[in-house]
Image: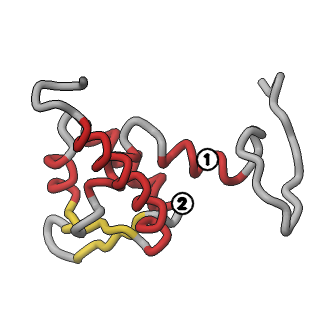
Amino acid sequence: MTEGVQRRQVVAGKPYDVFHTDCPARDLVDHVTSRWGIWVLISLRNNDLRFYELRESIRGISEKMLAQTLRALVQDGLVWREVEPTTPPQVTYGLTEFGRDIGEPLTELFDRITRRLSPHGAG
């Protein structure tokens, strides 16, 4: 069903309009700001991590949601994925240059929030 879907061509040299449903940048914004996307980007800000390390660093995420989130971020070019041919395969993830660029303001936001919180919660 496509009722209410706005269709527009993206013209080269024109800025993206993320308010239109067919804007290519909209999916990327959705992936970055998804419930788990922001946590993956923040978790990878300092180190490359293996799948299980990411799962342990992001409390509450299921393996399924982590796999889906990583797949989207890899496809968007924000995260790279390296598979070591071992048994079982070891998969490592890290931020691309684009991912670091996008993750920087998210990390700054995260740091600002945690600095402003009182020791016993928001306040």
- Helix, strand or loop under label 2: loop
Picture quarter with the C terminus:
top left
Question: In front here: 77 or 18?
Answer: 18
For label 1, the residue is 27
User: Which mark sits nearer the N-terminus, 2 or 1?
Assistant: 1
Residue 92 position in % (x across, y down): 25, 68
- Helix, strand or loop under label 1: helix
Q: Residue at x 36, y 41 (%)?
A: 36
Outermost residue to the left: 119
Q: How far apart are labels 2 and 1 at the CA level?
A: 9 Å
Q: Which mark is residue 61?
A: none
Under mark 2, the amino acid is: Asp
Q: Is residue 22 left or right of residue 41?
A: right
Q: Residue at x 38, y 46 (%)?
A: 38
Q: Residues within 10 Å of mark 2 (few under 14, many from 20)?
A: some
Q: Residue at x 41, y 64 (%)?
A: 79
* C-beta proximity under 8 Å, tags 2 and 1: yes
Question: In front here: 19 or 122?
Answer: 122
Q: How is the image coloured?
A: secondary structure
Q: Is residue 81 left or right of residue 77?
A: left
Residue 121 position in % (x across, y down): 18, 25
Q: Residues within 10 Å of mark 1 (few under 14, many from 20)?
A: some
Q: How many marks?
A: 2
For label 2, the residue is 76
Residue 113 position in % (x across, y down): 30, 40
